[in-house]
């Protein structure tokens, strides 16, 4: 009888542990959304553990009226880890970034933002010519959405992934040493109409200019040696693409096209550009 009671208690205890464990796991996966002083925020995803944290949060938007704003280090006792977007910050002109908070691509979403500063204690960022850079100045991480022209500092080698996406920049002034345009760097940029990629740019990664719905003309200079899949897909108004590097590597998979239908490709005779045009039945014109 005693053994039966012990066995029953053990089973009950195991069920209790499993139930408690599952409840805790379920709670950890819940993503809440709340508002505070114009900020909308939600749980921060802990990649290392694959769960959402309640004590660490992400700012998803700001809809307050402030013209000058310092990103709060904490909201309602919870630590702010990153800022995902500022598209609702209609009046924001100046943004101060403290140490330890990720911002990057959120800057381009603020429609009137022009000035950014970082704390002297910030170990990750610095600002040069209005651009948010890594400490070495070799990577452009974000650019304020209140400007029409993105002026890439000469020290920049890489334009980071999604650094200038969902914005209205009309022109890009390339730095002398820029070699790589990251994944989705200018995705859904609705201000661009003509894009001239020259200087020293060599690689345009996937989705870099995808969804630039007003883009009509693209010129890829002689040093551009690789354009990855979907780099210009969903650019519905794109009519002409000039490719001056005869051996420029273009993605020719049937799943994701580099350029949309209806575009005319201009390139060298016998070039990879001509092969691409032939494969997808696009108009091709030879340039000298």
Image (tube, helix red, strand yellow):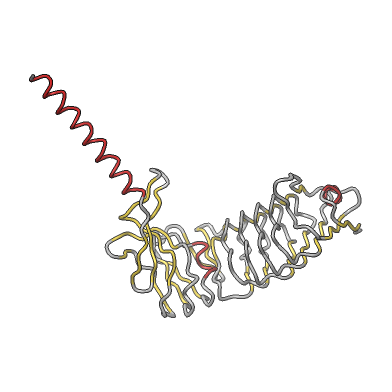
Residue at (83% x, 47% y) in the render: 279
Q: Name the side, left or right, on which 161 lies relative to 57.
A: right
Q: Quadrant of residue 34?
A: bottom left
Residue at (11% x, 19% y) in the render: 3
Residue 252 x, y percent position in the rendering: 76, 46
Residue 60 x, y percent position in the rendering: 43, 64
| Residue at the left extreme, as displayed | 2
Which residue occupies the foreground of this view, 59 or 146?
59
**Number of disc labels:** 0
For the C terminus, give its image quadrant: bottom right
Q: Is residue 253 above or below residue 107?
A: above
For the N terminus, give its image quadrant: top left
Residue at (36% x, 61% y) in the render: 80
Q: Is residue 123 above or below residue 110?
A: above
| Residue at the front extreme, as displayed | 1
Q: Name the side, left or right, on which 268 lies relative to 136.
A: right
Residue 226 x, y percent position in the rendering: 73, 49
Residue at (69% x, 60% y) in the render: 234
Q: Quadrant of residue 211?
A: bottom right
Q: Name the side, left or right, on which 219 lies relative to 106.
A: right
Residue 241 x, y percent position in the rendering: 80, 61
């Amino acid at each position: 009888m005693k053994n039966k009671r012990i066995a029953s208690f053990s089973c009950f205890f195991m069920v209790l542990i499993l139930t408690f464990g599952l409840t805790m796991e379920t709670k950890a996966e819940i993503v809440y959304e709340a508002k505070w002083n114009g900020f909308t925020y939600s749980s921060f995803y802990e990649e290392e553990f694959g769960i959402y944290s309640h004590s660490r949060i992400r700012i998803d938007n700001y809809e307050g009226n402030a013209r000058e704003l310092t990103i709060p280090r904490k909201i309602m006792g919870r630590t702010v880890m990153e800022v995902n977007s500022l598209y609702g910050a209609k009046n924001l002109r100046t943004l101060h970034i403290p140490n330890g908070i990720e911002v990057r691509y959120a800057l381009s979403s603020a429609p009137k933002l022009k000035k950014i500063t970082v704390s002297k204690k910030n170990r990750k960022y610095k600002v040069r010519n209005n651009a948010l850079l890594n400490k070495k100045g070799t990577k452009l991480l974000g650019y304020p959405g209140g400007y029409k022209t993105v002026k890439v500092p000469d020290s920049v080698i890489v334009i980071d992934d999604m650094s200038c996406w969902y914005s209205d920049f009309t022109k890009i002034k390339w730095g002398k040493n820029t070699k790589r345009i990251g994944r989705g760097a200018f995705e859904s940029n609705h201000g661009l109409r003509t894009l001239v990629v020259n200087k020293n740019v060599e690689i345009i990664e996937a989705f870099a200019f995808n969804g630039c719905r007003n883009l009509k003309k693209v010129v890829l200079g002689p040093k551009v040696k690789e354009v990855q899949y979907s780099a210009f897909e969903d650019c519905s108004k794109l009519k002409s693409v000039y490719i001056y590097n005869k051996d420029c590597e273009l993605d020719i998979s049937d799943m994701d096209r580099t350029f949309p239908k209806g575009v005319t490709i201009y390139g060298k005779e016998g070039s990879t550009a001509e092969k691409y045009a032939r494969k997808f039945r696009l108009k091709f014109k030879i340039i000298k």
